[in-house]
Amino acid sequence: MPEKPGPAKGPNRLFQWRAMTAADLDRVAAIAAAVHPAFPEDAAVFAERLGLYPAGCLMLDGDGGSAAYCLSHPWRAGDPPALNMRLGALPAQPSTYYIHDIALMPQARGRGVAAAVVAQLVTLARAERLPTLSLVAVNGSGGFWRRHGFRAVADATLTARLASYDATATYMERRLTRKFHP
């Protein structure tokens, strides 16, 4: 059974991951625009992810309001959705747990909240009996993901999908066949 979203403690603040609702979508779009200005996505993309897999959509609340979001869902390994792509439906037989995005406003950074949500996503992936987690790393985030057990996957067939992000985008996977502590 997946763990319920929970707190991540930091200096002077208590942050709490919670389930995202449709009422959060405007804030998700605002955080996305602030954190990822070079990677714009339509609000419909966020709404669709929430509708398709609400268990993988989380908001981080702090004493100053919502400071981060996470969008994730089961998907097909080696086939990351292009930027700003609507999915239509989740696959009947997913082969990876895909992290679409974890976006943190500056006040949430450096407080362990991203590591806390990665641990929750590992739990969700295991509950879905999926062998890997996967994502497209952007904005120089590869080091963060490597510290959490992700490794870059070099595959020429990914080039077209990754081109919708930018030249530095990297597809990464983390195997879940053994216990790894995030």
Image (cartoon, rainbow, N blue to C red):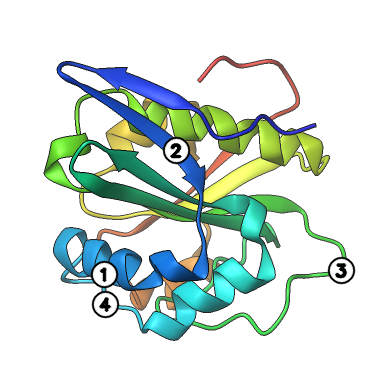
Q: Amino acid at mark 4?
A: Pro
Report the residue marked by disc 3: 92
Q: Quadrant of residue 159?
A: bottom left
First in sequence: mark 1 or mark 3? Answer: 3
Q: Nearer the viewer, mark 1 or mark 4?
A: 4
* Above or below 102: residue 21: below
First in sequence: mark 4 or mark 3? Answer: 4
Judging depth in this view, the residue of 32 and 85 nearest the camera is: 32
Mark 2 → mark 1, Cα distance in angstroms: 29 Å
First in sequence: mark 2 or mark 3? Answer: 2
Per the rendering, the mark at residue 166 is: 1
Q: Amino acid at mark 1?
A: Asp
* Above or below 66: residue 126: above
| Residue 56 % position (x, y) | 60, 52
Q: Amino acid at mark 3?
A: Ala
Indicate left or right for 73 with 166 as reference. right
Mark 1 → mark 4, Cα distance in angstroms: 12 Å
Is the C-beta separation of discs 1 and 4 under 8 Å? no
| Residue 17 % position (x, y) | 44, 38
Is the C-beta separation of discs 4 and 3 under 8 Å? no
Report the residue marked by disc 4: 40
Report the residue marked by disc 2: 17
